[in-house]
Amino acid sequence: MTSIASVPQTARQLRACLVCSLVKHSDQFRREGCDNCESFLQLRLHPERLSECTTTSFDGLIANINPECSWTAKHKKIDQFVVGVYAVGVMGSIPEWVEDEMSRRGIHYIPRDGSYTTNTNSSQ
C-alpha cells in the first residue's frame, strides 16, 4: 500500500518542496514536514528551514494518485514518492547543506526546475 501525503485544503499559501516538488499548505509543511524528504530536511523539527527548502514559485499541479502506473509520474520522476499533489515545475534550488546531506545518504538529487534531462538519444 502506498503512503498518502496530506492534500492541500486551500489554494492559498501553497509551497512546493524544492527536493521532491510535493505541494502542501505552509502550515501542513510546518506540522507534518515533507512526506518524502522529512528524514533529511526535518522541517517539523526546524520550521525555519521552510523558506529555504520549499518555494511559492512553481508551475502547475499534478495529482499523483497511482504513482506506480502513471506515465506522468515516471516522466516527472515522482513515481517513487507518496500519493499527493506535486508541482509540474519548481523554481529555486536547494541549499548546499541539503545537497551534501542527500549525497551523504546516497540519494541522487534531481532538480525540479526542468534543468535535469535524461539521455534519450536513440540510434535509428
Image (spheres, rainbow, N blue to C red):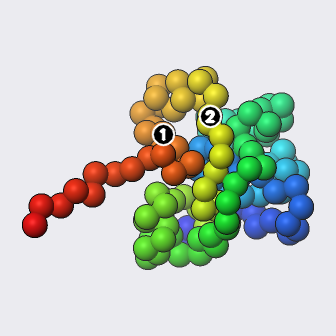
- Amino acid type of the residue tagged 1 in the rendering: Tyr
Q: Which residue is mark 1?
A: 109
The N terminus lies in which quarter of the figure?
Answer: bottom right
Q: Determine if residue 21 is in view.
A: yes
Q: Determine if residue 32 is in view.
A: no
State left or right for residue 23 relative to residue 105: right
Task: Please count the marks in the image.
Answer: 2
- Pointer 1 and pointer 2: residues touching (CB < 8 Å)? yes
Q: Which residue is at a point 88% across and 51% down the rendered structure image?
A: 27
Please provide percent x and percent y for residue 63: 64, 73
- Amino acid type of the residue tagged 2 in the rendering: Ile
Give the distance between the C-alpha atoms of the residues marked 1 and 2, in whole angstroms: 9 Å
Q: Which residue is at a point 47% across and 25% down the rendered structure image?
A: 104
State left or right for residue 30 relative to residue 105: right
The furthest residue to the front:
124
Judge the density around disc 1: few (<14), some (14-19), many (≥20) Cα neighbours within 10 Å.
some
Q: Which residue is mark 2?
A: 94
Q: Which residue is at a point 51% across and 51% down the rendered structure image?
A: 114
